[in-house]
Amino acid sequence: MAVLIDPPLWPARGRLWSHLVSDSSYAELHAFAERLGVPPRAFERDHYDVPAERYEAALALGAEPVGCQELVRRLTSAGLRRRPARAPR
């Protein structure tokens, strides 16, 4: 059971972002994000978007650094992956 973070590689709004997830529960993820100082509005379906400048702080709090594919694999294996809803055709 761990909180995982991928490298800040995802560009948006003039910054780079990481994804923060838990491989055990959303409760663990929300508690960790609160300790990290990430606002609830940064939660999207199954992860938090974390700006690059908070990456080192996440590691210092105990987040496990993993690659993007490993993050998705472990999130899916835990049954916590929530894909976006499909638009009606």
Image (spheres, rainbow, N blue to C red):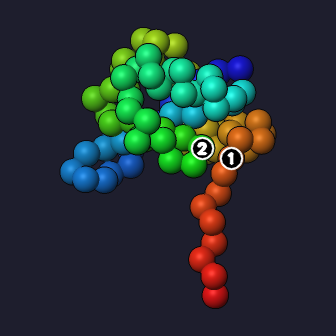
Residue with the most extreme front position: 40
Question: Is 35 placed above or below 48 here?
Answer: above
The kind of secondary structure element at disc 2 is loop
**As drawn, is 51 to the left or to the right of 32?**
left
Residue at x 21%, y 51% (from the top left corner): 14
Write down the quadrant of residue 71 in the picture.
Answer: top right
Q: Position of residue 57 (x, y in %)?
A: 37, 18
Q: Is residue 73 visible?
A: no
Nearer-the-camera pick, 74 or 37: 37
Q: Is residue 27 visible?
A: yes
Residue at x 63%, y 66% (from the top left corner): 85
Q: Which residue is mark 2?
A: 46
Question: Is 33 placed above or below 18 here?
Answer: above
Mark closer to the chain start, 1 or 2: 2
Residue at x 70%, y 36% (from the top left corner): 74
Image quadrant for the N terminus?
A: top right
Q: Position of residue 80 (x, y in %)?
A: 71, 41
Residue at x 42%, y 12% (from the top left corner): 60
Q: Which residue is mark 1?
A: 81
Q: Amino acid at mark 1?
A: Arg
Write down the quadrant of residue 53 in the picture.
Answer: top left
Mark 1 neighbour class, 10 Å CA radius: few under 14, some 14 to 19, many 20 or more:
some
Q: CA distance from mark 1 to mark 2?
A: 6 Å
Q: Amino acid at mark 2?
A: Asp
**As drawn, is 67 to the left or to the right of 40?**
right
Question: Is 26 placed above or below 47 here?
Answer: above
Residue with the most extreme left position: 14
The kind of secondary structure element at disc 1 is loop
Asked if the residues shown at circle 1 and circle 2 are in contact, with their CB atoms under 8 angstroms apart, the answer is: yes
Write down the quadrant of residue 22 in the picture.
Answer: top right
Nearer-the-camera pick, 38 or 67: 38
